[in-house]
Image (cartoon, helix red, strand yellow):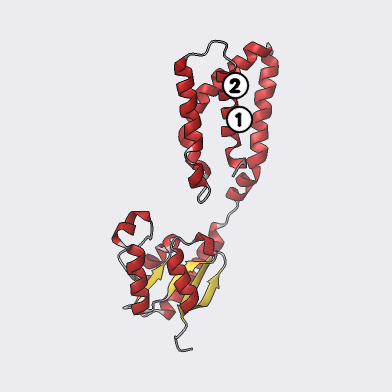
Amino acid sequence: MIKETVAIWILTLFSGTYFFSRRKRRLNDFWIFWVLILFLILPIPVFLFRHYPHYWIQILPFLSILAAAGLSKILEVQKIKLELLKIILLALVLFNIILTSQNFIERTKNKGISVYKEQKKIVEEIKNLVPKEEKILTENQFVAFYFLSNREPLTKFLYLTEINEKEDAIKTTKKEIIKNKPYILWPLDPSQAYSKDIQTYIFENYRVKKIFFENHLVIYEPKDNLD
C-alpha cells in the first residue's frame, strides 16, 4: 500500500522539515509535532490486519498545511529559485502519477459486464438449488444475492461484523447452519471472509458445489446432501 500513500509520506517529510529546521522552536510547535507523530503511529496496529489507504485521508489537511510551511522553510534555507521549485513540484506530481498509474488503468477497465453476466448465472443456480421457502447464507460481500435470488437470509444478521458481535451473531449463525444445513455463498479467497470460525466449519462440513471466478464466489453444499 506504499504506492497509494506516497503523497502522504512526502507531505510528512516536508512537515518534519519545518519543525526540525526552525532555529527558535516554541513549545506549542512541539506539541503539534508530537500530535502529528501520534496520528501516524496509532493506526499502525490496525494496518497490520486491514490496511486501506483511505484510513490516512483524515490527516491530509493537517499535513498539507505543515508541508507548505516545511517547503517554505526549505526554500528559505537553501535559497532555491522559484523556477527550480516548480520543477521539483512537477517532478513530485509526475512521480506520484507514475506510481499509481496502474490503478488508474485497472479502474477504467470495463469489468462490470462480465461480472453482471455471471451474477445472473449465480442467481439461476441458487433458484435451481434452493426451493423458494428455504433460506440461504451469504458472506458479507454477497448479501445482494438474497434480493437477486428472492431467497430469505438464514438469520437476521445480514452482515457478520464487530457491530453485531455483541448479540453473538457468529455463534447464532453457526447454530442455524448446523440446524438447517443451507446452501452457502462464500468468498473464493479464504482471507476475505470475516468469520474464520464459520469458515472453518464450512470447510470441514461442506463441499464445493460451484465456483464463479468473475465474482470470486463459491457455492457450498452440505457434504451429506444426496447427489
Tell which of 117 and 142 is nearer to you.
142
For the residue labelled by badge 1, is the local secondary structure a helix, a strand or a loop?
helix
Most extreme residue toward the bottom is 226
Mark 2 Cα shell of 10 Å, populated few (<14), some (14-19), many (≥20): some
Q: Position of residue 40 (x, y in %)?
A: 51, 35
| Residue at left offset 45%, top offset 73% | 201
Q: CA distance from mark 1 to mark 2?
A: 11 Å
| Residue at left offset 54%, top offset 18% | 69
> Mark 1 near mark 2, Cβ–Cβ under 8 Å?
no
Tell which of 116 and 138 is nearer to you.
138
For the residue labelled by badge 2, is the local secondary structure a helix, a strand or a loop?
helix
Q: Position of residue 84 (x, y in %)?
A: 70, 17
Image quarter of residue 124? bottom left
Q: Is residue 22 left or right of residue 120?
A: right
Mark 1 Cα shell of 10 Å, populated few (<14), some (14-19), many (≥20): some
Give the amino acid at mark 2: Thr
Report the mark closest to the observer, 1 or 2.
2
| Residue 62 seen in the figure | no
Compared with 58, 19 (above or below) is: above
Q: Mark 1 sits on what residue? A: 10
Q: Position of residue 192 (x, y in %)?
A: 51, 60
Q: Is residue 175 left or right of residue 63?
A: left
| Residue at left offset 47%, top offset 38% | 42
N-term-proximal mark, 1 vs 2? 1
Tell which of 205 and 118 is nearer to you.
205
Q: Image quadrant for the N terminus?
A: top right
Residue 17's disc is 2
